[in-house]
Amino acid sequence: MTAVNRVVYEIPARLDPESAEWLRVLGGPGAGREAALARLHEMLLGIAQREARRRGPRLLIGGPELEDLAYQAAADALMAITAKLGQFRGESRFTTWAYRFVILEVSAKLGRHFWRRPDMPLEAEDWDRLPDRFGFEPARESEWRDLLAALRRAVDTELTARQREVFVAIVVNDVPLDALAVRLGSNRNAIYKIMFDARRKLRAALVANGYLDDDDSGRS
Amino acid sequence: MNGWSALDRFLRTDPRDVGCAKAMEMLHVYVDLVAVGGDAEERYPGIAAHLRACGPCGEDFEALLAAVRETAD
């Protein structure tokens, strides 16, 4: 009778020895696989804890909640890794490929956690905070007042409703992009694309009105 | 950097920018190349452009690179 729970993966030909060993033991039977899973989980947990502790305070998350988030991220990453083991093509070291899962899990979980804060109305717009966001000095307001007024006009007149909603949330209200994606039932890639198009439109408007230079020097 | 140039820099878009999905799909390959001192920007200019412009993806890149370097020690 053939075992149904064990999948034998094809190991890519050009693998460094360490990656090949990971694939061999994770795709193998019994105690060796269990030990490898435990070791991988420990590595993932360490990365998740460090990242959660680094990013958590900025999002006002700490203590047991943050530890729990790290444990969940490591567990979910391990599950995803074992499920997708056959997709590893050896383009990087195995551990780099595996660590990516836990980093992305931490990001996603922190994005979801953001909305547990009670002081996060999405609809509020505090444009007065915009100068500080970009480092405009209050003492030199006469130099930038017209620029920011033009920017606000362009936000109202040049952007679609969706682009304006995303721009205001991220730039004016300082909502993290991942958190906004959760709130809007979207994903990071789609929200970034909306912001990308909004940025392009706003810069074109400011260039057309003489507030910014029409050159390519800042691209890098 | 003053506010004027910070705003200008923020609004600039790079047509080579591949977006989050493609950048995250290749992040492990890009990070390994950076970790060994390879010229990742030259080989993957669209990913490099994206990581410069996208805060969340840039942060994930830095986090993965740090994890790789720490566990290599």
Image (tube, coloured by chain):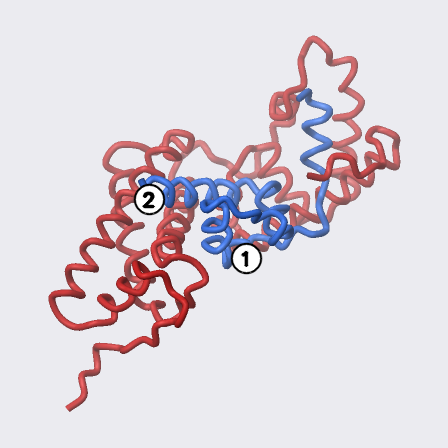
Residue A41 horizontal/vertical position (percent):
23, 53
- Is B44 on the left or on the right of A157, as rendered? left
Circle 2 crowding by C-alpha within 10 Å: few under 14, some 14–19, many from 20: few
Residue A175 horizontal/vertical position (percent):
52, 37
Instruction: Determine whether A110 is above or below A4 in the image.
Output: above
Q: Which residue is mark 2?
A: B72
Residue shown at the point (11%, 66%) measured from the top left: A31
Disc 2 is placed on an element classified as helix
The quadrant of the image that shows the C terminus of chain A is top right
- Is B14 on the left or on the right of A28, as rendered? right
Of mark 2 and mark 1, the one earlier in the sequence is 1
- Is A89 on the left or on the right of A213, as rendered? left
Q: Which chain is red?
A: A
Q: Which hue belongs to chain B?
A: blue
Amino acid type, residue under disc 1 in the picture: Ala
- Give yes or no for contact between labels 2 and 1 (Cβ–Cβ under 8 Å): no
Q: Which residue is mark 1?
A: B21
Whether residue A193 appears in this view of the structure is no
Residue A55 lies in quadrant: top left
Find residue A162 and name its label. none
Whether residue A30 appears in this view of the structure is yes
Circle 1 crowding by C-alpha within 10 Å: few under 14, some 14–19, many from 20: some
